[in-house]
Amino acid sequence: MDSANYTPEELHELRRFTLRYLGCTVMSLLLTAAVVLLIVRVRVGGILLPWRSILYFCLFTTFGGYQQDHARLYPGSSVTLLSVLRFYMPVTMVVMLAYLIYVAISTVWWVALIAFAAGMLIAGLGPADKVLGLISLRYAEFMLSMVGFVGLPVSAYLMFRHVP
């Protein structure tokens, strides 16, 4: 974020809402993860689903979605940041597809469908707090997009590591 593009009031608003926004996002992720955990923890057809791997995939899709939104709505002047965001988008898609194919091969094909549905459900809940007006769209994408530069590789490693 280039602070020259923002007024002092906007910077103050960003600082004030950062913790509130991250708290809302973490709470929505935890609530959805708890529901998914209850569903996925059950043995389906004699197969215990890889719930940890699916939860890391959900986190991965959330970070990827925020980075795509940030790249699409990028207001800044840094060409380097925009280039990095645009580089991450196709890489994120390739990792998601590779994960789903790997899960389908390692377990059974419908486990990949469950992982995909859970990932889209949780990633879809992220914008709900912006729609409700808890924080401005401009700051939301920025904050989780920046966290995503670390969160994407870490969650990608963990989601592949926990596939049986």
Image (tube, rainbow, N blue to C red):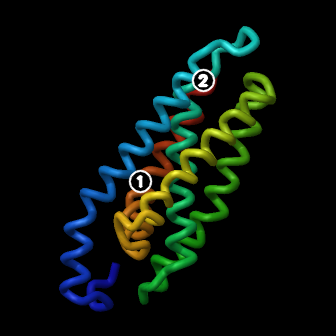
Disc 1 packing (10 Å; few <14; some 14–19; many ≥20): few
Q: Quadrant of the N terminus?
A: bottom left
**Front one among 35 and 114:** 35
> Image quarter for residue 9?
bottom left
Report the Cα–Cα distance between label 1 and label 2: 27 Å
Tell me, for residue 40, which label it has, or none: 2
Query: In the picture provided, is 56 more to the left or to the right than 120?
Result: left
Dot 2 falls on a residue whose secondary structure is helix
**Front one among 134 and 75:** 134
- Residue 24 lies, in percent from the top left, at 35, 51
- Residue 79 lies, in percent from the top left, at 48, 85
**Front one among 98 and 120:** 120
- Residue 52 lies, in percent from the top left, at 52, 28
Dot 1 falls on a residue whose secondary structure is helix
- Residue 12 lies, in percent from the top left, at 19, 76
Residue at 72% x, 28% y is: 111
The residue where tag 1 is placed is: 150
Can I make out residue 6 in this image?
Answer: yes
Inspect the image, locate mark 2, and give the three-letter code of the amino acid beneath it.
Answer: Val
Of the image marks 1 and 2, the number of the one nearer the N terminus: 2
Disc 2 packing (10 Å; few <14; some 14–19; many ≥20): many
Residue at 60% x, 23% y is: 40
Can I make out residue 102 in this image?
Answer: no
Residue 36 against residue 4 in the figure, above or below: above
Q: Nearer the viewer, mark 1 or mark 2?
A: 2
Query: In the picture provided, is 22 more to the left or to the right than 13?
Result: right
Inspect the image, locate mark 1, and give the three-letter code of the amino acid beneath it.
Answer: Val
Residue at 50% x, 72% y is: 70
> Image quarter for residue 108?
top right
Marks 1 and 2 close (CB-CB < 8 Å): no
